[in-house]
Image: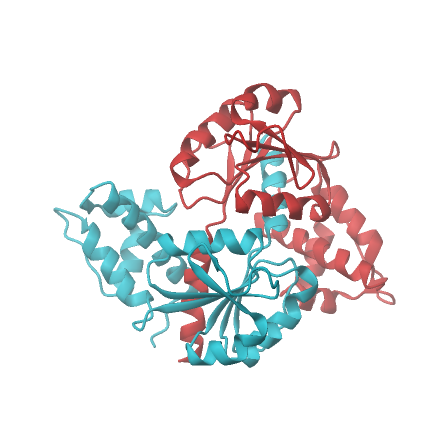
Chain colours: A red, B cyan
Amino acid sequence: MEKVSRKTIERLIIYRKILNQLKYSEISNIYSPKLGDLAGSTAAQVRRDLMTIGYNGTPSKGYDVGDLENSIGEYLDNPQGQSVAIIGVGNLGSSLLDFCYWRYPNLSKIIAFDIDSSKVGTEINNCMVYHIDDMKKILPNENIEVAVIAVPEKEAQRTCDLLINHGIKGILNYTPVRLLVPDNIFVEELDMMIALERVSYFARVKKI
Amino acid sequence: MEKVSRKTIERLIIYRKILNQLKYSEISNIYSPKLGDLAGSTAAQVRRDLMTIGYNGTPSKGYDVGDLENSIGEYLDNPQGQSVAIIGVGNLGSSLLDFCYWRYPNLSKIIAFDIDSSKVGTEINNCMVYHIDDMKKILPNENIEVAVIAVPEKEAQRTCDLLINHGIKGILNYTPVRLLVPDNIFVEELDMMIALERVSYFARVKKI
């Protein structure tokens, strides 16, 4: 696969999201300055990013919203559809299930895992919950390579190790633990408290 | 306030978190290469960042974990303590309340708001829930300038506008809506689906 910078990929994901929202507002065309503005970027950056994936607008009409959304999707998305495992369905995991079903553009399947016997075997937000011990069978069978960790902190690293043993390649980590993983595993940390600390600090210094 | 780069502040927040975890593991000293390693950075970067806040280790013993944690705290934290409002206590907001109470280093108060009459007037995860209509009185009275938005998507911008009217300066946005705010307001977006798209993409290309 050709090398596209991480930053470009991150911006493409945001462009697609904006285009999706525009589509629902029945806006069919957009010019690069406006798209740049909505994405917190510039017109020149938008044009560079889209040229990277071989997409060009027309000077007279700008970009076609639906067509550009599809083209970015073809570039970013797994052609087989994306399956995701969510480990831990407490409050946070449940809210993720809720979001996923109507938000994630290329989702083909979500499977949830927990150890709580009152949850295992039930459906939460339309998603079947399996016991964590079943991961070793289900993850490879379903060809799931992406997982979200939303377990209690003290279980985080052990859960992570298990997931990697069972073939997971990408992890979204909602626990405050910094996970130790091999180089070939991609981890994204979403630490709520670190985010809140950033907001608190920058909100305060903006005033000074 | 002196100008310290955003990146430095973000790293200081991470160093503090690591130091806090080390303290609980009863580790009392750490050298810059190790701290850099745990933070996904380098020894030289750690030393530069800490010099920015006037902190120096000793070549023989490295940094004192507790003392450095406190010094970073003095630099980052609001000396009056940090009060936070959480707007929307569905699954996501509830899980945030749960995290906040035992995680946020400088938290002095959390107040939750919702419109659901079955929640208003009750305590969720030790936090009193008020009606959103009471924000205009409570936020200024309690001097709250930081808020988390965890409401349904279609309420996001209206909630944001209300918060700013009532004196909020920093917002952590958990909805997928990109909020429009004046320049003097700091917003951090935590879009779960964008994070999951990033993980899906980078996990896939890592294999190629």
Q: Quarter of the image containing the C terminus of chain B?
A: top right
Residue A132 in picture, x, y percent from top left: 52, 26
Residue A162 in picture, x, y percent from top left: 48, 26
Foreground pick, B106 / B127: B127
Q: Residue at x 40, y 69 (%)?
A: B83
Foreground pick, A121 / B177: A121
Q: Does residue B64 show up? A: yes
- Quarter occupied by residue B176: bottom right
Tell me if B97 is positioned left or right of B34 in this view: right
Q: Residue at x 55, y 32 (%)?
A: A118
Foreground pick, B202 / B18: B18
Residue A172 to residue B2: above or below: above
Q: Residue at x 33, y 58 (%)?
A: B105
Residue A101 to residue B5: above or below: above
- Quarter occupied by residue B136: bottom right
Q: Residue at x 63, y 28 (%)?
A: A144
Q: Quarter of the image containing the N terminus of chain B?
A: bottom left
